[in-house]
Amino acid sequence: MRSIPPSMQAQLDAGVTTFCHCWRIDPLFAASIGFTDHDEDIAFDDVVFEAASAFQGTSIERSLGLAIDNLTATGALQSERIREEDIDGGVYDGAAIRLWLVDWRAPASRLLLFKGEIGEITHGSAGFEVELRGLSEPLNRPIGRRFLKVCDAEVGDGRCGFDTQLPGFRGEGTIESISDSRNIRAAGLSEFEDRWFDDGVLTWTSGRNAGRRSRIRSHLGGGDTTWLEFLEPPVLQPEQGDAFSIVAGCDKRAGTCRSKFMNFRNFRGFPYIPGDSWIAAHPAEGMIHDGGRRGS
């Protein structure tokens, strides 16, 4: 049961209230922002909740047990703090969100109605709709290892354990020219052999994409000319002179882990599990059928 502040309970009992809703969004890699359905800005906890933002949510249904308490919020792209390119760039993916019922005359008197994280976001040219996932949502997610021939870790993460700061495995470069949305000509990577950054990750260090990451599909180097092809176009169109850092790529195969990174002891795949062809195999004429091990 919620504990309602006495001042708010008194207004509810009287039948006349001065309440409004306040939403706070805490992105993982950006500053916190707030919105309210009141007609004036409200501030508390070092966040200004912007008025007239056209940000509103559906009703909240509470349930007992492990049922998931999710809801949907809609908003207009009229706030300078929520931009279309930030939504497309994943700035708000997984961001923490809280909803309060607040007495706009005395913001210290408030009641937390919902706490969770942002899920799927869809938007058009003028507005957006966002799924808000409750605290019990993670209990509905499958967890555990996957049995694959390839590794399911990322280069340099805690499970991989490889130090990407080692000489020869990280490069710094800038854009010389742009061919199209997926291909750029880069400077500063001439010392690396062809295909070294295939399946690598590029982090933008300047320009409009600064702080964002782009995955590399292919790396072609020849003399002083280096071409990088992105798996997907960057969120914002990069410009000539934009700087970046890039980490050597890994195709997650056992042989690559062993020969390129010399990190096979941390390989997180199962390279020797039989595939579908072994399961579907049947006796063939000329084979020895003595119950022994199948030849490879």
Image: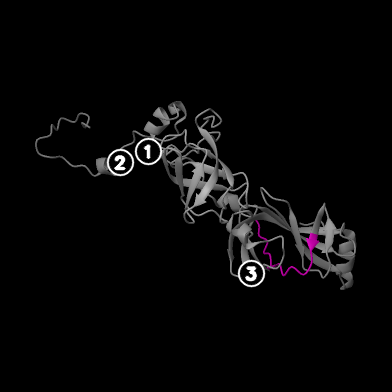
Q: Nearer the viewer, residue 274 or 159?
A: 159
Q: Residue furthest bottom?
A: 15
- Asked if the residue under mark 1 is in contact with the one under mark 2, i.e. CB atoms within 8 Å, the reply is yes
Single out the mark in the foreground, 3 or 1: 3
Q: Quadrant of residue 221?
A: top left
Q: Is residue 214 above or below residue 49?
A: above
Q: Residues within 10 Å of mark 3 (few under 14, many from 20)?
A: some
Give coordinates of residue 59: x percent, y percent.
69, 68
Question: Contact (CB < 8 A) between labels 3 and 2?
Answer: no
How dense is the environment of label 1, judged by Cα within 10 Å: few (below 14), some, or many (20 and up)?
A: some
**Residue kind at label 3, given as amino acid type:** Gly
Residue 266 at x, y percent in the picture: 47, 29
Q: Which residue is mark 3?
A: 127
Question: Disc 2 and disc 1: Cα gap in Å?
Answer: 9 Å
Can you say which quadrant of the picture contains the N terminus?
bottom right
x and y percentages locating residue 138 in the rendered image: 59, 50
Residue for badge 1: 149
Mark toward the viewer: 3 or 2: 3
Q: Residue at x 29, y 44 (%)?
A: 276
Q: Secondary structure at mark 1?
A: loop
Q: Which residue is mark 2?
A: 275
Label 1 is placed on what type of residue? Answer: Lys
The stretch of residues the image draws in magenta is: 49-64
Seen in the picture, residue 96 relative to 150 is either above or below; the reply is: below
> Residue at point 82% right, 52% down?
46
Q: Earlier in the sequence, mark 2 or mark 1?
A: 1
